[in-house]
Amino acid sequence: MKRPLGAQISHMLKDRGVDTIFGIPGVHNQEMYRGIEEAGIRHVLARHEQGAGFMADGYARATGKPGVAYVITGPGLCNIMTPMGQAYADSVPVLVLSSCLDETAARRGQLHQMKDQRAAAEAVCDWSEMAQSAEAAYGLVDRAFEEFAVKRPRAKHIQVPIQLLEAAADPAPLPEMTSLPVTTTTTNAQQVAALLNYAKRPLFILGGGAAGFEWQDLLSQLGAACFTSYAGRGAAGGDYALDFGAFLARPGSAEVIASADLVIAVGTELAEVEMWRPHLGHRAALVRVDLDTEVLSDPQRAALKIQSDAAGFATALTAATEGKSAATGWEAGEVAEARGRWLAEVDAERPGIVPVINALRDAVPADVMVYSDMTQFAYVAKEAWAMARPRHWHHPTGFGTLGYALPAAIGGAAARAGQPTLAIVGDYGFHYTMQELGVAGELGLSLPIILWDNGKLKEIEDSMVRSQIAPNAVVAQNPDFCKLAEAFGARSAAPTSLAEMQAAVQEAFAAPVPTLIYVTPAITG
Amino acid sequence: MTQTTVGEALVLGLKDRGVACVFGIPGVHTVELYRGLAASGIRHVTPRHEQGAGFMADGYARVSGKPGVAFVITGPGLTNALTPMAQARAESVPVLVISGANTSASLGKGLGHLHELPDQHALARTVAKTSCHVAAPEDLDSALEDAFAALSSGRPSPAHIQVPLDVAGEARAAPARPVAAAKAPVSNALLKQAANMLKTAGRVVILAGGGTKHAARNLRVLAERLDAPVVQTTNARGVLHDHPLSVPASPSLKAVRSLIEDADCVLALGTELGQTDFDMYATGTMPHMPALIRVDVCQDQLSRHPAELRIEGRVEDALTTLLDLLPTGDRNTDGAARATEARDGAWLEIGADYRQQVLMLNAIRDAAPSALIVGDSTQPIYAGNLYYDHDRPGGWFNAATGYGALGYGIPAAIGASIAAPSARVICLVGDGGAQFSLPEVMAAVDENLPVTFVIWNNHGYREIATAMEDVGVTVVGCDPTPPDFAATALSFTIPHRQVPMTPYALAMALHDTAGLTGPQMIEIKAPPFVPAKD
Ligand SMILES: Cc1ncc(C[n+]2csc(CCOP(=O)(O)OP(=O)(O)O)c2C)c(N)n1
Ligand SMILES: Cc1ncc(C[n+]2csc(CCOP(=O)(O)OP(=O)(O)O)c2C)c(N)n1
Ligand SMILES: [Mg+2]
Ligand SMILES: [Mg+2]
């Protein structure tokens, strides 16, 4: 049956497995809203399009499925550009659908008009396209889903002119099966196996892209040690004795890497934000495994490059190394010693946070999923909080934007009903998206939010001090956070000891609404 | 010669150009901008989101007439400021955004640097009129010149300067002194032609845009001399308060359109003839404007619409000369009667709901004379944009027009207050729009600004719910539960009171709080959206 295209698009998304859309309606995109309820999709109403974008990101990171957002022309789209930039940098499948004006060249000064909306969006995502017909719109949606399945996933944008959204259109074609990602050939796997035959100290570097596979058995069969990137934390399970952890940013990690006689980096950009140095530091051959040729061709001097998904690589390598005896060059003691040393460095760099992190980790269930913001608490935790499961800690790593954690946690919690989710935010960063608390309340999410209040933009103050600048503009007044949370229908707690904090967190997981847990450095006494 | 870093030189260059305040959020990537800031004497206001920085700079610029400046970090800092930049572009407001950029060697390589964008410079150019990249220390002088030229010549527009992390800390000499821009005089020959057309016309109508806000006195003299009704766009409200020739109503309304179409000569001053003023019901047609004379600072703008005569220049300059060319003395072309007819027709046309809301606006104006009313996209602001007679030129502005970004009101009001510390600023914002930028109220607390945040709380996106219902869409996503505003105000440590939706109650609340020196909140209990029965 013919229906307005706006409505058909929601049906199409539903047929492709979309069960939740994050967004904000306006007059321009109201036709897209026609289809949401009738298609049986849940709509989560954000308080700012930025919130909708981060929620879609959090949902996608939690489920591995694309996160979808609906926004209006102009300001709606501009408001979601920061989340798009974040999802681009961190390889998250986020699809943004917006309306656009029908005619922009001949008519100026229209409501929500900007110079070139499509081009502006394209500057922050994988691609941004305008559909000029229903078929084109359907084609673009299918292209986005296909690419999410087989390529390095990154944010994408589709815009549809208002008149086209209103015009009657046939339904979208039924979904086709998406193809499979490029994967590792037997030859490639055998090449790597051959390298492994000579290696006494093989070292894996597991990135976010590697997190889809449980590496522990393979690593221990090979006698290989590993590091993980921040996004790859947990890829080797929680108790693998040769796991050096997420300490790539420690200068000492370069020495360990230099001592390896084979390095295999899987699903990682080896980005500056992971290492804070231009080169990984390897002396031996580097094998690079990644879906994205942009990553494979970066300046890290790889001896062998394999374009492949991580799970396919791991499976092929398992087969190619069957029966091989484990390398013997690594010792559990040296790994434990290095980790201990680096943890002490982390603690010394930003004192007083590690004990709070340890108490918090002891209080949360093993399957907790954590979303963290740009606060010192999270910078410490990214290194100091060892994860037992992959894909359970999400941080705005690459783009590094403040205000990510709360809305992203909402998107994640909304996708994982009944499973525990935790958000960690700083006192200043919380201001960026605090309004989204109202959404968490509406959805009845049992979400503890750890608010780390050190009374300032501490990371920036520290940076000014390091640069010998008298700190300025780094203190902003805070509201009474607990009262504020209550104004948005949330609960609050202000524990004065670590034990009280643990109790508050546990209560929060059982509460029918979110709970803001206010923690200051004084909590350690 | 004194040595400074590029960051310090940039701050000095701003100071040389009269910048007195910047709105910024520092980050590791912009610390160099902060090295010289404290010593420079330039005031720094810290918003709670870069969007707030951009909108504050906008409100500041609109009220001070000087560029509003924002400091943001590279990447998310800039993407967060894009909406305000696009808003400033649509509304011709001089906003300068200064951002960091990643180290020069890394740009465009996709190495996964913190805050990295594939091409930030290109992104900025999609919203700013000009975006200057300071590739080396010596580029700073031309960057400042180019940016300030874009901000102040022609139709004011947003500009962007970006300084890479490595360049910001490099040494250089103090910045070159600003070059005073030569002001092109308005063509006398064209003004003479205009005067002749106006002299011989029998029924002149003046269309006043935001460009008239610094020429209110001469505009009144001109209107009286020509006996011409003055139709005011949203941004012109306040230029002719309570005057028989004033038509403070939207030219999208039929009654106002008839007034214009019935003229035999139309003089359009400082208006871009944009859709949100002239065709907000999107009929696709503009009112017919007989013998149109346009005066505008921007040549591009002038060429966009057919006109009999196009004069490039500032309205204030053009009016001074034009008045010299026009005879004084009585002239009766039924101006007042034509204006009255348009006003009465417009008042009827806007409907009962909007009339009731305009009465609320009148109550605000009368209880707080000469206030700046800064609005968001909420019901009474839409109503006022259709019909409302403000009492202070430049004292009524909002983002319901042009780019139409929700969330403008709160931060823009803060910027306005900083630019006019002795004025009372009233921010009128809906419960939905308030939630877009509510945390910025804390910046008003930081600065202890006399801003009254008036929240029109109808529990949802009334404007959108109504629009959906009109086209038969089941209303979805229009009911964001508002926070408890009383508790919110308490948590922000500012006074709050709630009033019923009557002009009297609102006036009393404004009276009672007139002496308060810091921010406060007044919440109006407005009727929530109720779906029509079918
Ligand atoms: C959108 C955006 N703007 C600015 C920054 C720069 N920045 C990084 S951390 C930070 C301070 C955050 O303060 P807070 O949340 O209190 O955390 P703290 O460092 O004090 O733990 C700032 C301003 C950023 N990362 N993203
Ligand atoms: C950034 C942005 N997102 C969405 C919109 C669409 N929009 C226009 S008005 C409005 C509702 C505003 O609600 P509220 O502030 O409560 O005002 P009301 O109409 O209820 O008076 C919305 C969502 C917009 N203009 N800008
Ligand atoms: Mg802090
Ligand atoms: Mg409302």
Image: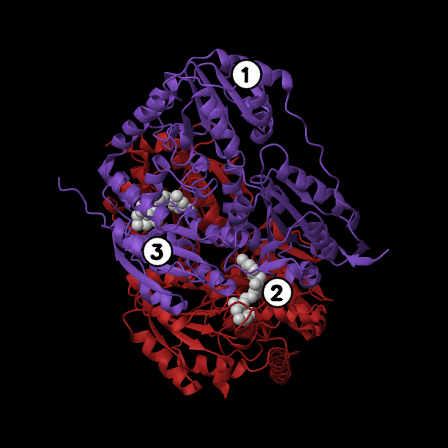
Chain colours: A red, B purple
Seen from the viewer's position, the closer of residues A459 and A297 is A459
From the image, state whether disc 2 or disc 1 is nearer to you: 1
Query: Assess mark 2: CB under 8 A from ligand 1?
Result: no
The picture places residue A206, in percent across and down from the top left corner, at 56, 65
**Which residue is rendered at x = 34% and y = 56% of the image?**
B511
Find the residue positioned furthest to the top. Answer: B200
Q: Is residue A183 visible?
A: no
Which quadrant: the N terminus of chain A?
top left
The picture places residue B315, in percent across and down from the top left corner, at 56, 29
Residue where numbered disc 2 is placed:
A274
Image height of A421 relative to B531, above or below: below
Few, some or many residues within 10 Å of mark 3 (<14, 14–19, 20+): many
CB under 8 Å between discs 1 and 3? no
Few, some or many residues within 10 Å of mark 2 (<14, 14–19, 20+): many
Seen from the viewer's position, the closer of residues A15 and A453 is A453
Q: Give the Cα distance between marks 2 and 1.
A: 69 Å
